[in-house]
Amino acid sequence: MSKVTSMRDAVAAFVHDGDVVAIEGFTHLICFAAGHEIIRQRKRDLTLARLTPDLIYDQMVAAGTARKLVFSWLGNPGVGGLHAIRRRVEDADPAPLELEEYSHFGMVGRYTAGASNLPFFPLRSYFETDLPKANPLIRPIRSPFGEETVYAVPPLKPDVTIVHAQRADADGNTQMWGLLGCQKEAAFAADRVIVVVEELVEESVIRADPNRTVFPGLIVDAVVVEPFGAHPSYVQGAYDRDNRFYRDWDAIAREASTTQAWLDEWVYGVTGRAEYVEKLGAERVAGLRPSGEAPSGSVDYGVYK
C-alpha cells in the first residue's frame, strides 16, 4: 500500500498534542514545510528535540506549539540569536519554555541509544564543561571493565521524527545525499516517521542505487511530496540556502508583534507549501536553483545469471 499522503494529512495523523517531535537536518534538509503545517494545525504542548534549533523552532516556539526544548545548540546560524525563544526563556513571554541542554555528541548519543534500545549512551566529552551541573540527566558512571569514569546520557525516543530528503518511493524507501546530520538515528529511534521529499520516484530508481537509501520503508509511516519544502534551508542539487531569509529573520523575530505578523502572512495566511513558494516569487526561487549540473558518476552493480 502506498504511504504517499499530503502534508496536512500526515501531520494530522502522526503529530499529536504533547508529543516529542524531532525535525532533524544539519543546516541541510531542514523541513520547514512540516514545521509550518504543525503551526497551522495549532498543535500544542510539544517537546521539540533537535541538535541545532534554528529558525524553524524559533517560529514554532513563537506560535505557541512548544512547552519544552531538548537541544545542543541554538541560534540563527551566521547571524545571531533566536529572539522568540529568548523571550520565552528570559521573560516567560508569553509563557515559560523548559530547556534540556546537551552537547552535539550528547544528542547524537541519545538518538543512538534510542535507536538501539539501549538504556544510556556513554561519552567522555563532559569532563571540562558545566553541562552536567546544568542538566542532571548527564550522569557520571564507572566503566564495567575498569576504574575509568565516563558520562552517560539517556535514550531519546521521539514520538515522531520528520526528515526531508531528495527522493523516496511510494513505500517510503528514502534516499538522500549531501551534508547529513543525525536524521538516520533520529528516525530509527522514533515511534513514527514522516519523510518529506522533493521527488517521488519508482522503486526501480531506489533499487538501482541502494547504498544511497538512508531510511528503509519499513520504518516510514508517511511520504509527503513537497518540492521546496526545506526552504530557507537547502537541498543539495535542488536549491541553495536562502541566506537573505536568515538575515531578515533576525529583525522580524526581535519583536513579538513583527513575529506574529510574519506568521499570519507566511504560515496561517497560506494553505500550504505550494502557495508559500508562489508567494516567494519566481525570481527568488530561480535565484536559488543550481546554475549547472554536477553529477556524481555511476557504478555498475552487474547482473548475475
Image (spheres, rainbow, N blue to C red):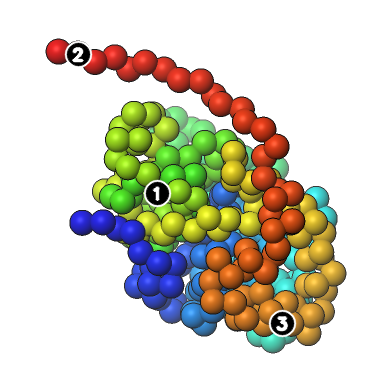
Q: Which amino acid does the dot numbered 2 rest on?
A: Tyr
Q: Give above or below for 19 relative to 115.
A: below
Residue 279's place in the image compared with 110, above or below, is below
- Residue 226 on image: x %, y %: 49, 58
Disc 3: CA contacts within 10 A as few (<14), some (14-19) or many (>=20): some
Residue holding disc 2: 304
- The residue wearing badge 3 is 260
- Secondary structure, mark 1, is strand
Residue 109 visible? The answer is no
> Could you say which is closer to the camera, residue 42 or residue 136?
42
Indicate the secondary structure of the residue bearing disc 3: helix
For the residues labelled 2 and 1, the Cα–Cα distance comes to: 29 Å
Q: Is residue 270 visible?
A: yes
Q: Identify the mark nearer the N-term, 3 or 1.
A: 1
Residue under circle 1? Answer: 200
Nearest to viewer (mark 3 / mark 1): 1
Vertical position of residue 162 compared to residue 61: above or below: above
Residue extending farthest to the left is 305
- Picture layout, residue 203 above or below residue 80: above
- C-beta proximity under 8 Å, tags 3 and 1: no
Quarter of the image for the C terminus: give it: top left
Instruction: Look at the numbered discs 2 and 1 and tell me whether their residues touch, using CB distance below 8 Å.
Output: no
Question: Cα distance, mark 3 to mark 1?
Answer: 34 Å
**Residue count near mark 1 (Cα–Cα under 10 Å), binned few <14, some 14–19, many ≥20:** many
Q: Position of residue 10 (x, y in %)?
A: 38, 68
How far apart are the alpha carbons under marks 3 and 2? 60 Å
